[in-house]
Amino acid sequence: MKEIEEVIDARGLLCPEPVLMVKRKMEKRSEGTIKVLVNTAPARENISRLARNQGWQITIAAAGEDCLITLVK
């Protein structure tokens, strides 16, 4: 069965809320792909740091004025 792709929309939220949203998703899923939309540099940097510390690979792509962070493990 194909995994349903879900994107966490953390645009407009102030840290630490975007990081907490991603952390909760990581706790439920030990592997796979997690995608996160953010629109602030601190959220992008903090989510990237969390993901690296947890052993996830990170790809960041511009999506208009937003960033799409893809985490893979």
Image (cartoon, rainbow, N blue to C red):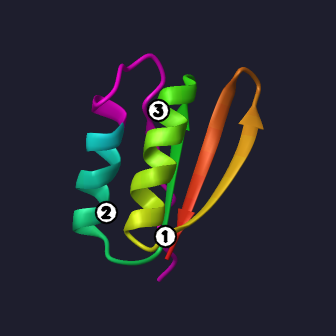
Asked if the residue at tag 1 contacts the one at tag 2, i.e. Cβ–Cβ closer than 8 Å, the answer is yes
* Residue visible at 43% across and 30% down in the picture: 10
Disc 3 crowd rating (10 Å Cα; few below 14, some 14-19, many 20+) is: many
- Identify the residue under disc 1: 56
Type of the residue with mark 2: Met
Position in image of residue 68 (x %, y %) = 63, 42
- Identify the residue under disc 2: 26
Type of the residue with mark 1: Trp
Determine whether 46 is above or below 72 in the image: above
Numbered label tally = 3
Q: Which of the two marks, 2 or 1, is nearer to us in this view?
A: 1
Which label is found at residue 43?
Answer: 3
Marks 3 and 2, how far apart at CA: 16 Å
Q: Which of the two marks, 3 or 2, is nearer to us in this view?
A: 3
Determine whether 14 is above or below 1 in the image: above
Q: Which quarter of the figure has residue 53?
A: bottom left
Residue sitting nearer the eye, 2 or 24? 24
Q: Is residue 7 visible?
A: no
* Residue visible at 36% across and 19% down in the picture: 14
Disc 1 crowd rating (10 Å Cα; few below 14, some 14-19, many 20+) is: many
